[in-house]
Image (cartoon, rainbow, N blue to C red):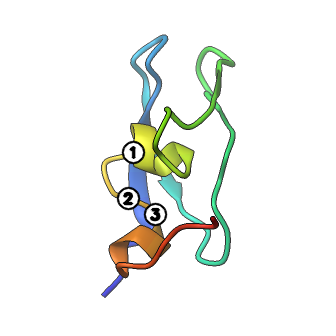
Amino acid sequence: MVELKSTITCPKCGKPEIETMPTDSCQWFYECKSCGEVLKPLPGDCCVFCSYGTVPCPPIQKGDSCCG
């Protein structure tokens, strides 16, 4: 079963935020609701959830490649 909720933690201000991940695409940008920092995936990661979230994106959870 794929988990759709992930907690993204901003590396700038440290504020965590629970978000629902899209099931049909990767999310390459995320704006922190606390400080406004725009997060981008870290090198080697496909999306912001894989870089800053507690749960990897749905394609990765399924064992697929992500939005490649």
Position of 13 relative to 40 (above/below): above
Quadrant (top left, top right, bottom left, bottom right) of the C terminus: bottom right
Q: Residue at x 40, y 69 (%)?
A: 60
What secondary structure is found at the residue carrying circle 3?
loop
Image quadrant of residue 53?
A: top left
Position of 9 relative to 26 (above/below): above
Q: Residue at x 59, y 20 (%)?
A: 34
Q: Amino acid at mark 1?
A: Gly
Position of 26 relative to 16 (above/below): below
Dot 3 corresponds to which residue? 57
* Mark 1 nearby-residue class (10 Å; few <14, some 14–19, many ≥20): many
Dot 2 corresponds to which residue? 56
Q: Please give the count of numbered marks on the rendered protein.
A: 3
Decide: marks 3, 2 in contact (CB < 8 A)?
yes
Viewer-proximal residue among 18 and 47: 47
* Mark 3 nearby-residue class (10 Å; few <14, some 14–19, many ≥20): many
Along the horizontal axis of the image, is 35 left or right of 5? right
Viewer-proximal residue among 45 and 36: 45
Per the rendering, the mark at residue 53 is 1
What secondary structure is found at the residue carrying circle 2?
loop
